[in-house]
Amino acid sequence: MSGHSKFANIKHKKEKNDAAKGKIFTIIGREIAVAVKEGGPDPSNNFKLATVIAKAKANNMPNDTIERGIKKAAGEGGGVNYEYVTYEGYGPNGIAIIVDALTDNKNRTASNVRSAFTKGKGNIGTQGCVSYMFDKKGQIIIDREECDMDEDELMMLVLDAGADDFSAEDEESYEVLTAPDDATLEAVRKALEDAKIPTLSAEITMIPQNYVTLTDDEAIKCIQRTLDLLDDDDDVQAVYHNWDE
C-alpha cells in the first residue's frame, strides 16, 4: 500500500511478498496479461508491459515465469479477461482510501472490498469522493544503500530523463516523481537501469495531499484491519490512503 512513510511501506510490502510470493506473482501475472493484450508482447514497444516486467523483477519473479506469462497472454483467444475497477471510501475518522483492483469477477471483488471496509468500521463511497484529495504521479523509489551515484548527479540524471521532481528527504531512500503516464515513467526508469541503479519500485501511484493522524487505539485497529483484509485479497492491486502511520 502507498502512504506517508514511502520506504517503510515498500519494505512492508516486500516483507509480506516474501512470505506470500504466490500472491504477488498472481497479481503481477494478471498485470502482464492485461498489458500484453493492450499493447502487445514486445516490452520495447509497450511501456506498460516494460513497467510490469520491472515490477516483476523487483519482486524476484523468475525470468521464465515472466516469459511464460507473456506468451500465454499473447496466445490466440486464451486466458482470462481481467478488467480494472477502482473503489473509494472512508475508514475511521474520515481516513480516505482508494482501492485499485484487477478482476475477472466484479461482483466478487465488490463484495470483498465492501466487507473489508465494513469490518474496519468504514464505508464505500461514490466514485470521486476521496480521489480529489490525492495527486496522481509516477513514482520511483531508490534505496540509498544500493545507489553509488552522487546525489546531485542522480538528480540531474532523472531530471534530464523527464522526471518532475527529485527528493532526498528520506534518510533511507530517494523519491523520483514523474508525470502520471507510462511513457514518462518508463523513460526515467530506463535511464536509471542504464546507469546500473536498481529501483525498489516504479509505478503510477496516488499521493495524498494531506495526512490524517490517528491517536485512538480502536480507530488504529480498525484501519489496520481494513488494510490487512485488502492486502490479502488477490484481486486488489494497490491501496492508497492518507493515514499517517
Image (cartoon, rainbow, N blue to C red):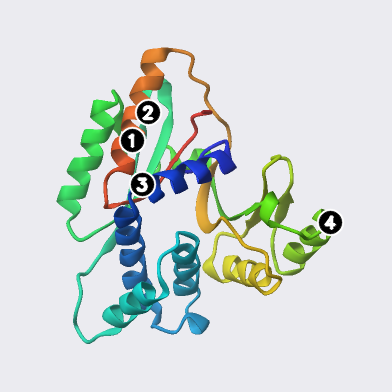
Type of amino acid under label 1 = Asp
Q: Tag 1's secondary structure?
A: helix
Circle 3: residue type? Ala
Instruction: Describe the element under mark 3 as helix, strand or loop.
Output: helix
Q: Secondary structure at mark 4?
A: helix
- Front tag of 4 and 3: 3
Instruction: Pick out the residue farthest to the bottom.
Output: 76
Q: Disc 3 designates what residue?
A: 19
Disc 2 crowd rating (10 Å Cα; few below 14, some 14-19, many 20+) is: some
Query: What residue is shown with label 1?
Result: 228
Q: Is residue 25 above or below residue 16?
A: below
Side of 168 relative to 75 (left or right)? right
The residue labelled by disc 2 is 224
How far separated are the C-alphas under marks 4 and 1? 38 Å
61 and 165: which is toward the camera: 61
**Residue annotated with mark 4:** 152
Secondary element type, mark 2: helix
Identify the residue at horizontal 48%, vertical 19% (top origin): 214
Mark 4 or mark 1: whose residue is earlier in sequence: 4
